[in-house]
Image (cartoon, rainbow, N blue to C red):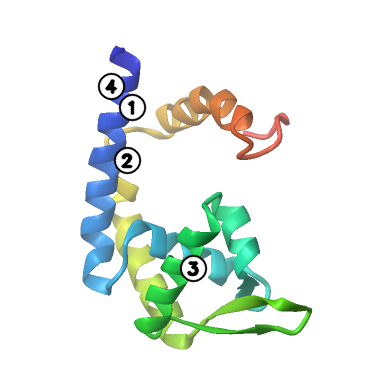
Amino acid sequence: MAAITSIMRAQQILLSEVDAVVKPYGLTFARYEALVLLTFSQKGELPMSKIGERLMVHPTSVTNTVDRLQAAGFVEKRPNPNDGRGTLAAITDKGREVCDAATRELMAMDFGLGVYDAGQLEEIFRLFRPLRVAAGDFADDPVG
């Protein structure tokens, strides 16, 4: 019980700190994650289904997130030419600017993890890895 309580409280603390940084940009952490994902994609665009896969969220959540990003002018949606039923989300110049600015601020505050040194961060990652592998976050390989 102590472990799960600590994990859940840590998640609340970190999410609160990160949300405080991204909120002035009109973002939540989920919307920020989607923008980052699009900036990392080769063309700055991805099918909505691929966004859901990579962020490991339900299609309804992806639609809600992308719709809000679109309303803010951070992404554009258009039909996927490779899939007649699918939709692409593409980051806009405004979306890149906002993502870059928010990332600079998040990096400056160490994503809320500044109380840990590099070794401790590696240990946190190592401790959570089996749980994440079991959940399908990534393959169980020796990386990390």
Residue 36, horizontal then vertical, whole percent: 49, 65
Kindly report the distance in space between the C-alpha atoms of the residues bearing marks 3 and 1.
Answer: 29 Å
Which is more N-terminal, label 1 or label 3? 1
Q: Which amino acid, mark 3?
A: Thr
Which is more N-terminal, label 3 or label 2? 3
The residue beneath circle 1 is: 7
Kindly report the distance in space between the C-alpha atoms of the residues bearing marks 2 and 1.
Answer: 14 Å
Task: Please give the name of the residue rendered at 36% of the width and 76% of the height, measured from the top-left corner.
Answer: 98
Mark 4, secondary structure of its residue = helix
Task: Please give the name of the residue rendered at 78% of the width and 79% of the height, measured from the top-left corner.
Answer: 82
Which is more N-terminal, label 4 or label 3? 4
- State whether residue 88 is above or below residue 61: below
Q: Which mark is residue 113?
A: 2
Binning the other alpha carbons within 10 Å of mark 2 as few (below 14), some (14 to 19) or many (20 upward) gives some
The foreground one among 138 and 1 is: 1
Binning the other alpha carbons within 10 Å of mark 4 as few (below 14), some (14 to 19) or many (20 upward) gives few
The residue beneath circle 3 is: 63
Query: Residue 51's image quarter?
Result: bottom right
Which is more N-terminal, label 4 or label 2? 4
Which is more N-terminal, label 1 or label 2? 1
Foreground disc of the pair 3, 4: 3
Query: Residue 83's image quarter?
Result: bottom right
